[in-house]
Amino acid sequence: MGPEPKQHPAEVPPGYPREFERELRLSDGRAIWLRPLVPDDSEQLAHAIRTADPETVYRRFLGAAPRVTPALLEHLCTVDYRKRFALVAADAATGVGVGIARYEAVTADSAEVAVAVDPAWRRAGLATALVEMLAEAALGRGITSFSASYLAENRPVRALLGLAGDGKQAIHAGLAEAAVALDRASVTAAVQRLTRDGAPGAAQGPAAPGP
């Protein structure tokens, strides 16, 4: 996926939450390193968007990919770790980026969520692990519900429904809208399982690289 992100960034923005730097093992045995996004990840993210295959682009953006500009990259890679939060996943063996998940607050206590995983790293529980850790971060920052728009067949995004105590989903013409209230006990238990056992094994559907 192009330029390699640093596992431990030398320079981090104010408020960078190092407690979200974690190594996890996926259901297929591969190890990944998760950490919060930093501005220096912009080159890696730009490469991922520009080189994504057409199917991946459509699944992520529900259309064409956005034009990659310095302003777009600055917006995507500059987060406050509270109302805007993102986690990146890298191959622990090579440091190459393989996934990203983010939320952006739309109200004081709700946020839109998106997850993207490199095609070679799908079906091993990575997307679910990213969403579970993102939910943990959200709850710790006053975000209590997630919403998402996605293709109805995109199972990694649907995985967030499993973290909900109460939720709803509407599907029309193959597009789904989901809104879920995050259940703290479910999220805590899921993250504890990740730390103890690694990512869950599941036949995850495709998600797309990108923001």
Image: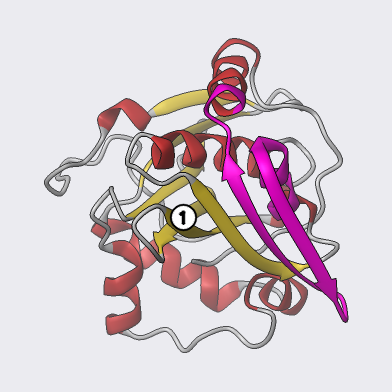
Start-end of magenta stretch: 157-186
Q: Is residue 86 above or below residue 107?
A: above
Q: Secondary structure at mark 1?
A: strand
Q: Which quadrant of the structure image shows residue 79?
A: bottom left
Q: Residue at x 55, y 53 (%)?
A: 146
At which x and y percent is residue 102? 46, 55
- In the rendered view, does 83 fall on the left or right side of 130? left
At which x and y percent is residue 52? 63, 72
Q: Quick check: is 179 in the magenta stretch?
A: yes
Q: Which quadrant of the structure image shows residue 139?
A: top left
Q: Which quadrant of the structure image shows residue 106?
A: bottom left
At which x and y percent is residue 165? 66, 36
Residue that numbered label 1 is attached to: 102
Residue 94 can be seen, yes or no: no
Q: Quick check: is 169 in the magenta stretch?
A: yes
At which x and y percent is residue 182? 56, 40
Q: Is residue 177 above or below residue 167?
A: below
**Front one among 136 and 170:** 170
Residue 129 can be seen, yes or no: yes
Q: Residue at x 72, y 38 (%)?
A: 162
**Front one among 181 and 101:** 181
- In the rendered view, does 69 fall on the left or right side of 204? left
Q: How many residues crowd around disc 1 within 10 Å: few (fewer than 14), some, or many (20 or more)?
A: many
Q: Residue at x 55, y 15 (%)?
A: 192
